[in-house]
Amino acid sequence: GLLIAGGANLNKRPYLIIGWILAILSVIAVIAVPLLPERHWNFMAQTRFNVFLVTDQNKGGDTAAVWLDQNQHHFVCTVKPQAKDSFCALQFNMVDQPGSGRDLSRFNRLRVKVHLQGPGKMLRMYMRVFDERISKLTQLETAKFQSYVFAPNSLRSVELPLAGFSVADWWVRDYAHRRDLAQLDFTNVLLLG
């Protein structure tokens, strides 16, 4: 008979080459991630979203909000100086069907263009996020309230990192009841204001 010694080692070379190629491709992929184009979505251009003004009037407040140009999302908000916890907001309803909003988890920041006049110097950007474990379709206040407070700059454009948003303490106290339910979540945004 014929005896071949060391035959198992003859086939290792192609596997080594493939291993090196895969290692090099992995390094290239890691280096290339920052070079990929950013994902952009201009939700203001979405004409199918309902846009409306919200005030504290349904909670007994005296704030008034009036459209100046609804197509351009220009409005004026009048807050009485002595009023406490007053608010008004431009709000985008991003609901496709009940309980089904927009998944913003693939984005890392929000760019906001705003022109603010008057004594107020701070703005709050907020999201209402539907989580089927705790949110109820018939009670909007159960949708998670996440916000970011900022001062608009003179350039009228501010970038807000999504990681900078926080879940409101009052919402955690009233609805979450568990710390794992109180984490930031951008997977099912119903309202943006």
Image: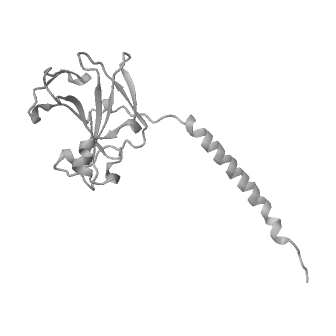
Residue 98 visible in the displayed image: no
- At 21% from the left and 24% from the top, the residue drawn is 70
Seen from the viewer's position, the closer of residues 45 and 78 is: 78
| Quadrant in the rendering for residue 123 | top left
- At 27% from the left and 56% from the top, the residue drawn is 133
Where is residue 50? Give x, y as percent: 22, 35
Number of callouts: 0
Where is residue 106? Give x, y as percent: 43, 42
Name, please, the residue furthest toward the bottom. Answer: 1
Q: Please identify the quadrant where the N terminus is shown.
A: bottom right
Asked if residue 169 is positioned above or below residue 109 in the image, the reply reads: below
Where is residue 124? Give x, y as percent: 28, 30
Asked if residue 168 is positioned above or below residue 47 in the image, the reply reads: below
Where is residue 2? Give x, y as percent: 91, 80
Residue 101 visible in the displayed image: yes
Seen from the viewer's position, the closer of residues 84 and 183 is: 84
Asked if residue 27 is positioned above or below residue 69 in the image, the reply reads: below
